[in-house]
Image (spheres, helix red, strand yellow):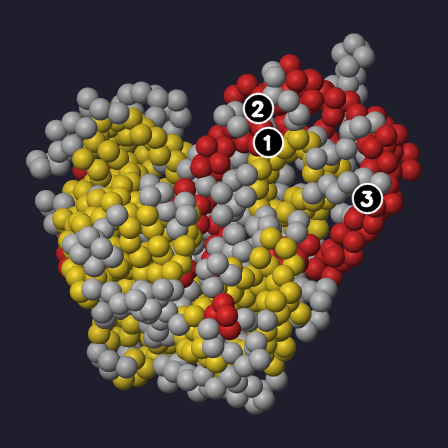
Amino acid sequence: MIGTRPQRRPRRLLAPAVALTAGAALALAGLTAVPASAATADPLSVDFSQTTGTFRGGATGTLYGLGDDGVPSQAVLDGAHITNTSQKPPEGAQHPNGDALQVESSFFAGGGQDLYVYVQDMYPDWAYNGGKRPGDANGDGVWDYLPILKKVVEDVATKSAHPEKYVFIPFNEPDGGNWYPNWSTQKDQFLADWSAAYDTIQQVYTEHGLGHARVGGPGDSTWHADRSSDFLSYAKEHAQLPDIFIWHELGTYNLATFRGHHDEYTRLLTTLGISPIPVNITEFGMLRDMGVPGQLVQWISMFEDEKVDAQTAYWNYAGNLSDNSSRNNGANGGWWMFKWYGDLAGSQTARVTPPHLNTPDSLQGLAAIDSSSRKATVLFGGGVNDVALDLGGLDVSTFGKTVQVQVRADRLNGAEGASLQPPVVLSTTATIDGGHIRLTVPNSDRYSAYQVQVTPEPTDAQPVSADLVNSTEAENATLTGATVYTQDPSREWSFMASGGKDVGSFNNAASSATWNVTVPATGDYRLSILSGTNQTPGKHALFVDGSFGQLVKYSADLGWGYRGTADATLHLTAGTHSLSLRASKDGSTMLPGADITLDRFDLYDVSSGERAVYPATEARLTGGASLSWKQPAAQGYASVAGDGSATVFATTAETGYYDVTTHFAATGQGATLALSANGRPVALPASSGPGVSDATVRLFLPQGVNELTVRASAGSALVGSVTTFRGAQQKAADANPALVFHSEAEALPRSGAAVVQTDPANSNGSADAQGVVRDVGYIGNGAANTLTVPRPSGFGAGDYQLVLGAANADKSAAINYNPQVISRFLDVTEAGGATTRAAFRHNYSWNSFWDKTVPLSLTTSGGALTLGNATAYGPNLDTVTLAKFVGAAPSITKTQTGLGNK
């Protein structure tokens, strides 16, 4: 938390062709393979026979990545596999949310292992206490900081369900203006204060019978060999060594210097005769790195290579994994990078040689091998040239002579952009030659990252994605009344733009961006617009072939550079069409909120619906589940039985009904599978006898990340994949009144101070026939101020999804450079039943609405639902939807009878 407040101002890569020099067949949806020698390519070599240790998995920790219980959602948190986070102490005044005790439940329920506490964040100001070390204001001989520290430790010791998993950081950036910047004159004071703080922490845990309390330090803002040497020498002499050694690596230059710093640190320990102490770099990276796959992979690979934990810095607000997740429940490009990294748990890392080690903004990577699963993985990115991969050390006794190679691409898509499953850009076989396969991945996008998986040949290889039919950078469109801006990555305090440029000053009635698209067939297409608004929603007119088609509604973002996505569905005939986004519908009057930054336009073919397949080779396997390569009809399937499970994290473009299909094989007498969707169990029909089957159930899923887990409740099974699909039938189910109750919030009964409000014309909310958006505000802050949702006939006891179109722009007064955003809460009470609390993340504007899905298990035959909050205000509500969780009875279809033996 150092530096200047971020300044904010008012070539996309199509599925890359990949050439394999091992004689593999290649089919890339019409794209031309690039010979390995044809173009400039940066070499990246991997030797899987040279393992470098057990995968640590701690390089995607976060500082204030969690805001409140439920912010981010459990599925987002679980999928990102965050093992360590730093949060504020209970009742800390530095920020309005991020309280460690409030987030520990969701953190430890996922992959959380170590919860750090920035104790000095009890202070409201930055630098702490005006940057001056507190004295003894009471004249009682007690340093004023010690009672504060003691209270924090007492709260954790007595109120936490897992006090043994906490790490206390008594000093944050003591070198950077927080109490001890001058080592020549303040060294002795800091060391004495370390002793006092260390003893205070241990005393509290001892008094409560908790044993040793873990302490992290010194916490410097950068690496200091001199301070670190003096500190370690003193701490060893006084038996007060930290359990975790902490410093920060924030600037771009640290991509070049960190390994040297870590080498100095390990030499210091050896010189001083100190046993290894784990390291956590509790703040790393700049604004330009967050949410950017090609930037993050450089940091992550570096930290994993050195087997240290590290946490993304906190430059904005708590609750979105440091800008690496989107909206209430969504994935952005950064989240997928986190997820891919977390998927490597249980493997061994392997030696990677990039073109230039310790070089910022260059091609870097990490690799891992899981020999028991017969799977090798490489994650790489950050360069601007094609990548010539040399994957060596592949043992044919593990993989076989012929292997499957699959490559997925993860793009920059804005902090609030909705990133669905990264597309497969290569799916082909290759022959291992002398332990090697070699391939060239065409690349010109420094902000993209790639995942390469090598396995034996699976039964169900994933095809190359053909959904994206056009991607156009906004700066390459024909522009009128707008300006192209360069977003230079050397400006560390800026957010990056796709292709390095965006289009702004879209602020007059003549402003337009026009480009051509060619579609292969007549059908429906989804236009996804990567864009940024300045804390207010807005609208553009979308013209097709020169005629007005529809209004595009944009939700609010943190700023013009803090980008998100807005979608519009088009019906297009086969051939070439002109698309145009305009600030005015009639050419003379600007649409409200039209001053919007445009970054990239992506057009997806959705004529056959929204389908995503999540194969077992990419699932997280726990409880004894493992990949099986024994059955010819089920190669690369996950063997599940007993406690074994396979989990995938499926991303959905919309909130609504999806068919979730589990493809599996059973032996013997068959098997019965159980599906869990975001923690809610769904029984699936049993299969009879040996064979391959599809078990399908229609579920109402929230937009964004959905955690889907498959187990065998009876017998054993080989799970091949989980597929989500949403087409015409599923969308029709959304409108079926027997399944879904939908209402404008203003049409529902209100009580107390809850009031109907008319929103400004730029609102992205649900409008009436006259184009007017209304919402209900002032819900809460008193038990009488409520909104009531009636239960229609036929909506009896059972599992439901309550979807609320909500807006929350609440903030506390600014006290430092962070936006001090506040989550709001609603209590949903079933008459005669239970109460469920829902958290609503800050979303920038009181008239910009996001869907929030609240799972409910109702127990009465028709008790109404009351929305309120007795102690604080809830969000503004635009729409209310109550949907039955299961929209159609589960079914099973046998696709193959019997299984052969390999």
Q: Where is the C terminus found, in terms of image quarters?
A: bottom left
Which dot marks residue 269? 3
Q: Is residue 286 above or below residue 479?
A: above
Q: Is residue 291 above or below residue 475?
A: above
Q: Is residue 110 visible?
A: yes
Residue 816 placement (x, y as % from top left):
63, 39
The residue tagged 2 is 156
Residue extending furthest toward the left: 793
Q: Nearer the viewer, residue 406 or 688?
A: 688
Q: Nearer the viewer, residue 841 or 373?
A: 373
Considering the numbered disc 1 on the image, is that residue within a helix, a strand or a loop?
strand
Q: Residue at x 74, y 57 (%)?
A: 259
Q: Is residue 311 left or right of residue 145?
A: left
Say what amino acid the circle numbered 3 marks. Leu
Badge 2 local density, few (<14 within 10 Å), some, or many (20+)? Answer: many
Q: Residue at x 72, y 64 (%)?
A: 358
The residue tagged 1 is 166
Q: Is residue 228 above or below residue 465?
A: above
Question: In the rendered picture of this protein, how many numbered marks are placed on residues?
Answer: 3
Say what amino acid the circle numbered 1 marks. Tyr
Q: Nearer the viewer, residue 25 or 678?
A: 25
Q: Residue at x 61, y 56 (%)?
A: 300
Badge 1 local density, few (<14 within 10 Å), some, or many (20+)? Answer: many
Q: Nearer the viewer, residue 254 or 54?
A: 54
Q: Residue at x 71, y 71 (%)?
A: 356
**Dot placed on the residue nearer the N-terminal end, 2 or 3:** 2
The part of the image, by quadrant, that contains residue 837 is top left
Say what amino acid the circle numbered 2 marks. Val
